[in-house]
Image (cartoon, grey):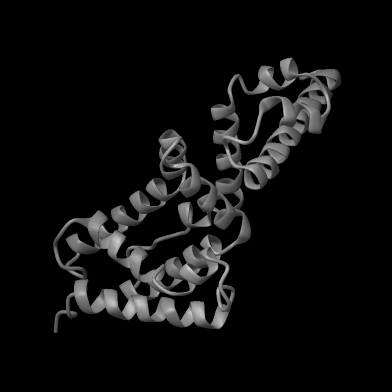
Amino acid sequence: MIPASTATLDDAAAARRKAFVDAAREAFFANGYAGTTMSSIASKVGGSKTTLWSYFPSKEELFEAVVDDIVEQYGHMLTIDLPVDQPVPDVLRGFGTILMTKLTATPLLSLYRLVVGEADRFPHLAETFYDRGPRRGKARAAEWVADKMARGEIRMGDPMRAVQHFSGLCQSGVYQFALLCLPGGNDPQRLAAEVDDAVETFCRAWCLPAPE
C-alpha cells in the first residue's frame, strides 16, 4: 500500500507540473517560443528556476509537454475508432468531422500558428509538433486505408498518400479561414458541408465500386 503522504506528494508534484505547463502554454502563445524564458515561467507560477528545471531541464522539453498536453485534450483523431467493416464514406465522414472540429479549436490553432511562426528559427519545434500529433493520426488512418485496399474497397496505392489527400480536402476551406482569423472560420454547418464534399471527392478518386 502506498503511504498517504506519498500520494499527497505525488498529487502536489502533478499539480505543480501542470501549473508550469499551463503557464508555458500561455507564454508561448503570447510571446512566441524565442520570446519566452524559463525565468518568466518560473516567476509566473512562483518559485525558482531550479524547481522548474527539476521538472523540465530545458525549454524544448517544456514545449514538448505543452504539445503533449494539447494533443491529449484535443487529439481525439488519434484514438477515434476506424472500423474496417463499415462503409468507407461513413468512416471517413466521422473521422473528418472529428478531425476538423478539433483542428479548428482555439488551442490547436494557436499551437499551429506558433509552430509555423517559429519553424525557420527552431525547426525542431515543427518536428516535435508533427511527430506528436499529425504523424500519429495519419499513421492510424493509413493503416485503416491499407485494410480497405486489401478488401478491395479502395484502389491500391500508397495508403499515406490517400490519407494526405483526404486530410488536404478537409482543410481546404473553413480551416484556412479559422487559421487566418477570417469571418466564417467557426461555422459548424459550413465545416460539416465541406467534410461531406471531401468524402465525396475522395471516394470518386480512390474508392472502387462494390462487387455485383
Name the quadrant of the C terminus.
bottom left
Does residue 207 appear to the left or right of 89 in the view shown? left
Is residue 1 in sight in this rendering? no
Does residue 151 appear to the left or right of 56 in the view shown? left
Q: Nearer the viewer, residue 152 or 60?
A: 60
Is residue 199 in sight in this rendering? yes
Image x and y of residue 102, in percent:
55, 61
Residue 120 versus residue 16 in the image, above or below: below
Residue 198 falls in image quadrant: bottom left
Name the quadrant of the N terminus.
top right
Image x and y of residue 98, in percent:
51, 65
Image x and y of residue 154, in percent:
20, 68
Does residue 57 appear to the left or right of 100 in the view shown? right
Does residue 138 appear to the left or right of 208 in the view shown? right
How many numbered marks appear? 0
- Residue at left offset 37%, top offset 81%: 197
Image x and y of residue 125, in percent:
47, 37
- Residue at left offset 59%, top offset 47%: 70
Q: Nearer the viewer, residue 58 or 153?
A: 58
Q: Nearer the viewer, residue 185 or 209?
A: 185
- Residue at left offset 34%, top offset 76%: 199
Residue 111 versus residue 83 in the image, above or below: above
- Residue at left offset 56%, top offset 28%: 61
